[in-house]
Amino acid sequence: MSPRTKEQNDAIREMRMNQIMQAAAEVYLEKGIQLEIRDVAMKAELGYGTVYHYYKNKQMLLEDLLWDALNRAELAVQPALTGDDDPLLKAELFARLLLQQCTQDLSVFILLKTVSDNFHHFSGNRFNKLYAEFQERIYLPVVHMIREGTGSTTPEKTANLIFGSLVGYTTLNIHHDLRDEMDMEGIIDMIFSGMQLKEREME
């Protein structure tokens, strides 16, 4: 039997990493910060040694999970960051894409929830850089769209309302196992219809 090629090894590594990340997200939702590498191995249906080969401790695993989620969240909302459409329409598309990604990818939901909780369950300052990158790549683009679209002097308040609504709605449906029944269009319409109504009242 001939040895595996570098491409084959890379493909196996990527497949294993995806298994581990998906399992880690599921276990984190069940156990929170109390998760252990052994729990993740069991959920992924991999040997403990296999998971340990990639991650020596849960801190390394969770850090990778969140950084990977940030990259995927940014990729998911890219269509809303390009083009010359009305800024509020872009903000609405951004929120819709981010909500869709949260429901399809639990690690992106965990990222948003963790940021909204200000990394409450994580000790030390190891996530300061991640928080700064999240602000730059996810949060501030929405703030900019709202400022451009409404002329508001406090666009951060509206951005907080949008992110808070997305996190709260997704949390409710995930923890009650209602993801298949989520009315994503309904919650997006409610948020942005309310914003437009408020704008008209201020005119």
Image: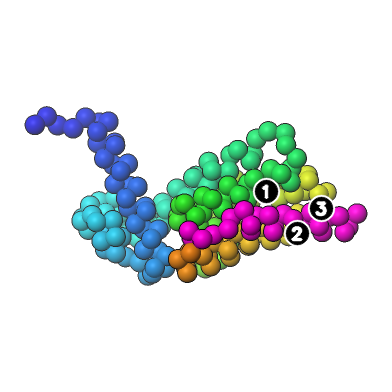
Residue 76, x across and y down, in percent: 54, 43
Q: Earlier in the sequence, mark 3 or mark 1?
A: 1
Most foreground residue, 64 or 174 = 174
Q: Which amino acid, by three-letter code, is at mark 2?
A: Gly
User: Looking at the picture, does residue 186 appear above or below residue 85?
Assistant: below
Mark 2 lies on a secondary structure that is helix
| Residue 93 occupies quadrant | top right
Residue range (magenta): 179-203
- Side (left or right) of 49 relative to 202: left
Mark number displayed over residue 92: 1
Q: Residues within 10 Å of mark 3 (few under 14, many from 20)?
A: some
| Quadrant (top left/top right/bottom left/bottom right) for the C terminus | bottom right
Where's residue 41, x and y in %?
26, 58
Q: Residue furthest left?
A: 1
Identify the mark at residue 28; answer none if there is no mark: none
The answer to whether residue 92 is magenta is: no
In front: label 3 or label 1 = 1
Residue 125 position in % (x across, y down): 51, 60
Q: Residues within 10 Å of mark 2 (few under 14, many from 20)?
A: few
Gap between marks 3 and 2, in whole Å? 15 Å
- The circle drawn on residue 152 is 3
**Dot 2 corresponds to which residue?**
194
Q: Amino acid at mark 3?
A: Ser
Q: Earlier in the sequence, mark 2 or mark 1?
A: 1
Amino acid on which disc 1 is placed: Glu
Taking 121 as reference, is 118 left or right?
right
Is residue 126 in sight in this rendering?
A: no
Q: What type of secondary structure mainly makes up the magenta span?
A: helix
Q: Does 186 lie within the magenta span?
A: yes
Q: Position of residue 53 (x, y in %)?
A: 25, 51
